[in-house]
Image (cartoon, rainbow, N blue to C red):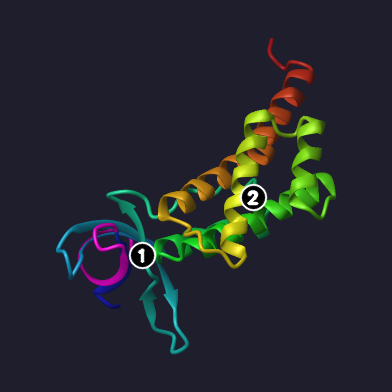
Amino acid sequence: MSNTTVIDCTQCSVRVKADIKFWVGDAQEEAYFVVECPACKKPLFGKSFVYQDDHNNYEWDNAERLWPVPSATEVSSSIPEAARRDIKDAQKCLSHGINSAATVLCGKALERLIKEKSGANMIAKGLADLKAKGVIDERLFNWAEALRRERNIGAHASDQETTKENAQDVIDFTIAIFDYVYTLSEKYEKYVARKASPSTDG
């Protein structure tokens, strides 16, 4: 297998092809690497998976950076698959400096949530419905409104620039609202069901 991998460098803010200095793992499915950026010479720690190419050769997939900071916030499996895909694509856009596209993809994920939970076709109306139903609270509603406005900047012709910081905030919020609506709600429902069931103790 190749002794190089492709990974995001935090110092250079680009994806680089870097030499693997050493790895830890059984090399059957996944491994953890220490690599050196060829440009700035900074060490990077990442994780990669083994895949089989069209010629039945085994190669490393592009690495996911775990240090100095993770390349992407973990997205809960409780979040619907299509929305998870949108969020992960947004994270990839951000890592490549495509900030406006990242916010648009987050808006797309939010549209999915709105359609499923309220049936509304417009984000603004859907957010109001979710607030009225108690699905989201006042703070999440206000944050969602900010996300919607930032998404509109990226989706429409505008002289305003979507900064990296704003795009990261939008991604963080998108994950937060999905975690609140899906992950935390699921955990709470399981807790309530467990408390309601007859105790098996004693």
Please state which amino acid type lies under the numbered disc 2. Answer: Arg
Q: How many other residues sit within 10 Å of disc 1, few (<14), some (14-19) or many (≥20)?
A: many
The C terminus - image quarter: top right
Task: Name which of mark 1 and mark 2 comes first in the sequence.
Answer: 1
Q: Residue furthest bottom?
A: 55
**56 versus 34 height, above or below:** below
Q: Is residue 76 left or right of residue 169?
A: right
Q: Assign a secondary structure to mark 1.
A: loop
Q: Given the current orientation, which residue lies at the most extreme top position?
A: 202
Place residue 97 in its image quadrant.
Answer: bottom left
Q: Position of residue 113 (x, y in %)?
A: 72, 49
Tag 1 residue? 63
As helix, strand or loop, the secondary structure at mark 2 comes to helix
Report the Cα–Cα distance between label 1 and label 2.
32 Å
Residue 9, position as x, y percentages in the image:
28, 62
Say which of marks 1 and 2 sits in front.
2
**Magenta residues?**
10-28
**Which residue in the protein does label 2 denote?**
148
Residue at the extreme right? 119
Q: Where's residue 163, x and y in %? A: 43, 55
Which quadrant holds residue 111? bottom right
Q: Residue at x 37, y 77 (%)?
A: 59
- Residue at position x 82%, y 45% from top? 118
